[in-house]
Structure formats: C-alpha cells, structure tokens
Amino acid sequence: MRVAFFGGTFDPIHRGHLAIAAAAADHLALDSILFAPTGLQPLKLSGSTATFDDRLAMTTLACATDPRFEPSTLDAPRADGSPNYTVHVLTALREQLPTATLFNLVGLDSFLDLPRWHQPHRLLELTEWIVVSRPGYTLDLSAFTPAQRTRIHPLDSVHEDVSATELRHRLQHGDPCLDLIPASVSTYIEAHRLYR
Ligand SMILES: Nc1ncnc2c1ncn2[C@@H]1O[C@H](COP(=O)(O)OP(=O)(O)OP(=O)(O)O)[C@@H](O)[C@H]1O
Ligand SMILES: O=C(O)c1ccc[n+]([C@@H]2O[C@H](COP(=O)([O-])O)[C@@H](O)[C@H]2O)c1
C-alpha cells in the first residue's frame, strides 16, 4: 500500500488541493490520499474561519471526485484545545499502517515553512515527502542532506494560482468563484451561509 497523508486547513477546500492530490497520486502511484483537515494549525493559532465540522464536511464532498481520495479525522481538534502537530499524527499513522509506504503531501509554500514546524528532522524521517509546485514559490533543497533528499519527491507539474484566502474574500464579497471550488462544496457553502 502506498498512502499519502494530506493535511490542510481546507478553509475551504479548493481546486488547487484536488489538483496537487491528483498529480501526486498519478506520479507516485498512490493507492490512497487521506485528506485530513487540521483542528488547530500550530502556525495559525488565530484559528480557521469555518468550524472543523464544516471543513470536514466540505472535504468529504470534495473527496467524492476521485476514488483515491479519502476524508480523514486523524488530525481532528484535540480534547485539550492544544495545537495539532503533524509529527504526532504521522507517528500515529505509521503505527496504524506499519507496512505501508507513507508519504506526506504538501504544497511548496508549506514545505518552505518546515523549519518552523514542530520536530522537522523527525518529520523527514517518519515518511517520504511529496512537495508540489505552487505559483510564486521556488524549491531549494540545498539545506537538506543527501539522505533526506532521497525521501523528498518534488513535483512541478501543477500551476494552480488559487488560495483559500482569496476564495474567502471572494465569497465574502459575493464574487463568483467559477470553477475554483467543486460544485458540491459551493452548494454546501451557500446552504450553510459560510464565509459571508
Ligand atoms: N494552489 C495550490 N498549489 C499548490 N499547493 C497548494 C495550493 N493550495 C494549497 N496548497 C497546499 O495544500 C495544503 C493545504 O493548504 P491550505 O488548506 O492552507 O490552503 P491555502 O490555499 O494555502 O489556504 P490559505 O490561503 O488560507 O493559507 C498546503 O500544503 C498548501 O501548500
Ligand atoms: O506540525 C507543525 O508544527 C505544523 C506547522 C504548520 C503546518 N503544519 C501542517 O501543514 C499542513 C498544511 O497546513 P496549512 O495551514 O497550510 O493548510 C497541515 O497538515 C498542518 O497541520 C504542521
């Protein structure tokens, strides 16, 4: 089994997320990708706009677009309200799937922030990493050791200039989001009056 963990605030999930997941699944022959909305992202302690339950519901709808995509509650909010550290969730996933080849899927902007994450060296040991291009960001692997570099898979075939921040602004101002969000997710956002 080749499984990728794909964590994100997903506030809301959008075309960029689905594009990087599809590219990763195609290029690395993944059996499944676990889309895990993050309870409380350690570097975004002011929190998300939509609740975890709404972000999970939108993620679940979006995952229906590809049989390799699965929504996951592995990174749900913690009972004590503390931040969700990826090193903990990947350790738990490794215990659940001891024989799988595990990957952590991130966009390049997230990967460039890795030095600020909790236990970055341990994170690079726990899984292989798939790092997907994002407009405006450049990959530089010179700070990594040769051993670390063999576990980092750069993918530069995705050029999706879309962000959740931009979408929240558009939704707040009633601007069209066209095909930037899956139709089922747009319907959910409207029905639940999110991001107004
Ligand atoms: N357009 C994109 N191209 C490549 N990677 C992306 C893109 N959008 C998001 N990602 C990646 O998906 C993961 C989850 O991203 P997140 O949910 O924070 O979306 P975002 O659009 O970056 O949100 P925000 O604007 O609120 O920061 C991160 O690893 C991020 O790098
Ligand atoms: O563990 C950390 O210290 C850490 C710090 C920043 C981000 N992350 C994770 O990176 C993933 C992408 O985050 P985001 O906010 O860009 O969607 C998500 O799974 C976060 O939990 C993790």
Image: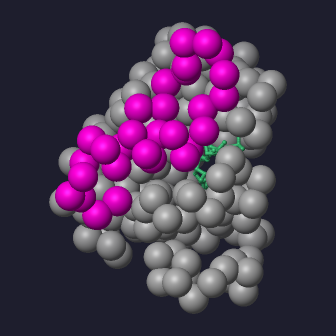
Q: Residue at x 55, y 19 (%)?
A: 78
Please give the count of numbered marks on the rendered protein.
0
| Position in image of residue 129 (x %, y %) | 49, 66
Q: Residue at x 63, y 84 (%)?
A: 145
Query: Which quadrant is home to the N terminus?
Result: bottom left
Query: Which quadrant is home to the C terminus?
Result: top right
Q: Nearer the viewer, residue 107 or 45?
A: 45
**Quarter assignment of residue 138:** bottom right
Vertical placement of residue 28 versus 141, above or below: above
**Quarter assignment of residue 133:** bottom right
Q: Nearer the viewer, residue 37 or 55?
A: 37
**Can residue 187 be seen?**
no
Left or right placement of residue 5 versus residue 120 in this view: left
Q: How is the image coloured?
A: one colour
Residue 146 highlighted magenta (yes or no): no
| Position in image of residue 193 (x %, y %) | 60, 12
Q: Nearer the viewer, residue 135 or 177?
A: 135
| Position in image of residue 61 (x %, y %) | 36, 30
**Can residue 148 be seen?**
yes
| Residue segment shown in magenta | 74-102
Q: Residue at x 58, y 26 (%)?
A: 39
| Position in image of residue 185 (x %, y %) | 46, 30
